[in-house]
């Protein structure tokens, strides 16, 4: 269920200063942090709101919940991957 948590953590674990120039490092780390924050928000939603393994939530509903609860909407592709189709 929480396979969406693996990618941000794997990217941080495999991070290396030798692979990219400074601008690419900054960009990759910023994106990874955003994905991690989004995954933590989604984990919170699953733990407190959506107990069902297949919750009836749309990406728009989840984004609105995240905005109301955390003040940010998070990564669009991750929300869509977990909760359905973009639309």
Image: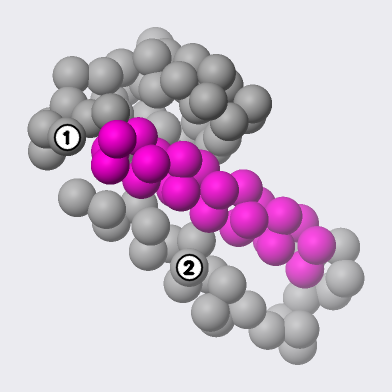
Mark 2: few/some/many CA within 10 Å (<14, 14-19, 20+):
some
Q: Please, which residue is most extreme toward the front here?
A: 48
Q: Please, which residue is most extreme toward the right here?
A: 22
Residue found 49% across the figure and 15% down from its top: 64
Q: Are marks 1 and 2 in contact (CB under 8 Å)?
A: no
Pinpoint residue 74: horizontal percent, then vertical percent: 56, 35
Q: Quadrant of residue 6?
A: bottom left
Left or right: residue 83 versus residue 59 is left
Q: Is residue 30 shown in magenta?
A: yes
Tell me if residue 61 comes above or below residue 32 in the rendering: above
Q: Secondary structure at mark 2?
A: helix
**For the residues marked 1 and 2, what is the alpha-carbon distance in whole angstroms?**
24 Å
Residue assigned mark 1:
51
Left or right: residue 81 versus residue 8 is left
Q: Quadrant of residue 20?
A: bottom right
Q: Which portion, as a residue range, is magenta?
A: 25-48
Left or right: residue 64 versus residue 51 is right
Question: In the image, which disc is placed on residue 9?
Answer: 2
Quarter of the image with the C terminus in it: top left
Tell me if residue 60 comes above or below residue 21 in the rendering: above
Foreground: disc 1 or disc 2: 1
Q: Secondary structure at mark 1?
A: loop
Q: Quadrant of residue 26?
A: bottom right
Pinpoint residue 82: horizontal percent, then vertical percent: 30, 37
Tell me if residue 60 comes above or below residue 53 in the rendering: above
Residue found 46% across the figure and 48% down from its top: 40
For the stretch drawn in magenta, the main secondary structure is helix
């Amino acid at each position: 269920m929480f396979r969406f948590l693996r990618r941000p953590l794997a990217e941080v674990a495999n991070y290396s200063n030798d692979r990219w120039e400074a601008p690419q490092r900054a960009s990759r780390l910023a994106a990874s942090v955003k994905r991690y924050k989004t995954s933590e928000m989604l984990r919170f939603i699953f733990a407190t709101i959506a107990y069902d393994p297949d919750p009836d939530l749309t990406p728009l509903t989840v984004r609105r919940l995240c905005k109301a609860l955390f003040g940010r909407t998070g990564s669009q592709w991750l929300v869509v991957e977990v909760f359905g189709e973009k639309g």
